[in-house]
Image: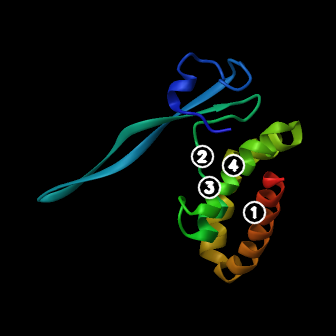
Amino acid sequence: MSYNSSDFESGKCPHCGSSDVSKEHNLMNLAVAHGAGYFFDFPFDSSYECNKCGASNSDDCFIATAVYGDRNAPQVKTLRQYRDDVLMQSAPGRAFVKFYYSGVGRKAAGFIREKIPDAIPVIRTGLDWLIERYTSESQD
């Protein structure tokens, strides 16, 4: 499930109550050009992830964003709902989500974009099938 940073400020996971929570600072690389260009990292947010259940304040769907081209595409939003409503409701689903957000999802998305962009239509077909199945079951 995806939460806001403030949900983790108590030091406990808002989903399972565990205090085994990791925190990373997200840095934005800013360029300041006054004659010579200066670059520095500026902290703009923190990422939290529960090491027990995988709940986090990150809702990036890396592969879906690579496939649909926009992190706010309706299909990507539906896949986030699927993650929260289906995957996060079981131990195997939570393990998959934790594995995906451990860096594998981001690396896979980069590989797809850079090395096998011709596979995007095939991956999109599979994701479209999953979205259609999920939305039709949600309406029942």
- Depth check, front residue: 50 or 64: 64
* Residue 48 on image: x %, y %: 58, 32
Counting residues from the start of the chain, the first of labels 4 and 2 encountered is 2
Counting residues from the start of the chain, the first of labels 4 and 1 encountered is 4
Mark 3 or 2: in front is 3
Which residue sits at x=53%, y=65%? 70
Q: Amino acid at mark 2?
A: Asp
In the drawing, does residue 62 fall left or right of residue 33? right
- Depth check, front residue: 121 or 106: 121
| Secondary structure state at the residue bearing disc 4 | helix
Counting residues from the start of the chain, the first of labels 1 and 3 encountered is 3
Label 3: which residue? 77
Q: Residues within 10 Å of mark 1 (few under 14, many from 20)?
A: some
Q: Amino acid at mark 4?
A: Gln
Tell me: residue 69, above or below residue 87. below
* Residue 2 on image: x %, y %: 63, 38
In the drawing, does residue 136 fall left or right of residue 39? right
Q: Which mark is residue 131?
A: 1
Q: Amino acid at mark 3?
A: Lys
Label 2: which residue? 59
* Residue 113 on image: x %, y %: 61, 72
Which residue sits at x=72%, y=19%? 18
Tell me: residue 119, above or below residue 58. below
Q: Are marks 4 and 1 in contact (CB under 8 Å)?
A: no
| Secondary structure state at the residue bearing disc 1 | helix
Q: Which mark is residue 81?
A: 4
Q: CA distance from mark 4 to mark 1?
A: 10 Å
